Amino acid sequence: MRLDPIAAPSPARALGLPALAILATIALAAALAAIAGANPLETFGLIVKGAVGSKFATLETLNRATPLIFTGLAVAVAFRARLWNIGAEAQLYAGALMTVVIGTQLGLPGPLAIPLMALGAIVAGALVLLGPVLLKTRLGVDEVVTTLLLNFIMALFISYLLEGPLKDPMGMGWPKSPALPRDARLPRIVEGLRLHWGFALALICAAGVWVMQTRTTLGYEIRAVGQNQQAARFAGIPVGRVLIKTALISGGLAALAGFSEVAGLKGNLTSDLSPDFGYTGIIVAMLALLHPLGVVVSALFVAGIFVGADSMSRAADVPTYIADILLAAALLFMVLAILLTRYRVVRG
């Protein structure tokens, strides 16, 4: 058996295989629900109801999707250039850390603090990814390893800070940072509920990335480098500089997830700020086929699965882990679908 590349996949193949991947994921989830002793149709109905069955549920889904849009965009931008950024989690925490430092240590008024916190977060996330990219372009070090390891380094660094220099003296011993002043937090979109203006910022970023990728020279260069670095270099495209620019954009987007979680939702930094938003962003980007506008839809889908699964678990007594399995299976099936879209399995 061998894989032969397909020069121009047909529309039926390009759209049909990802659709089959989604159907296979649904079939697997139905089988798991049946094994758990629940009615699959009822289980899916409870997930949908828990995700969008009320105003509160819908806004919670949008709220959960906000950091996933940022991390999904970060991964999509990097992967488009074949820069394998597995460190969105580290960049998220770098952005959250800079948000807390600027918001609590400088004593700035809210109208000035919020944009400075966002800008500081972007710079911090960009610098976190810049190191691995320089190692890749200058020394040929695999960025998968360096970005993955930076996740653990950043997690330990955050734990150190929360147990030491950044520990809230009024936190009754809990490892958390001081809270942001009330006027330095993002306002709520709907008063009394948790959805904040970070969601609107995420949508703006998605539109901006789409414009950048489709309407600018940099977007063309990123696509060219991602398709064939040697050909891009032969055509005069500075591959190293394009990868560095891509890294700065990707790291900054991931860091905005940390900014939005701290400034819009939590109000302070804790070691469990992110329930693996950085890693889940990889699933979001792959389900969207790296399309920036598709990332928004994909993030809403993934967030709906998580929010709906919580509600479903309480109503049907089915473990919430079914959501994790569903998303992992969706990623595997989608990767396989993408592979078979570009390659044909041939005997001999």
Image (spheres, rainbow, N blue to C red):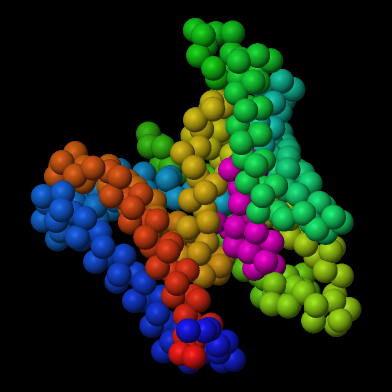
Percent coordinates x, y for residue 261 in the rendering: 53, 37
**Residue drawn at (54%, 26%) of the image:** 270
**Residue drawn at (43%, 69%) of the image:** 334
Secondary structure predominantly adopted by residues drawn in magenta = helix
- Counting every numbered tag in the picture gives 0
Going by the image, does 283 lie left or right of 94?
Answer: left
Relative vertical location of residue 10 with respect to residue 37 in this rendering, above or below = below
- Residue 188 seen in this snapshot: no
Going by the image, does 31 lie left or right of 143?
Answer: left
Front one among 174 and 261: 174
Region rendered in magenta: 72-93
Relative vertical location of residue 197 with respect to residue 223 in this rendering, above or below = above
Q: Quadrant of residue 43?
A: bottom left
Percent coordinates x, y for residue 323 in the rendering: 32, 50
**Residue drawn at (28%, 49%) of the image:** 322
Front one among 220 and 155: 155
Going by the image, does 137 lie left or right of 43?
Answer: right
Q: Quadrant of residue 20?
A: bottom left
- Confirm whether the magenta stretch covers residue 90: yes
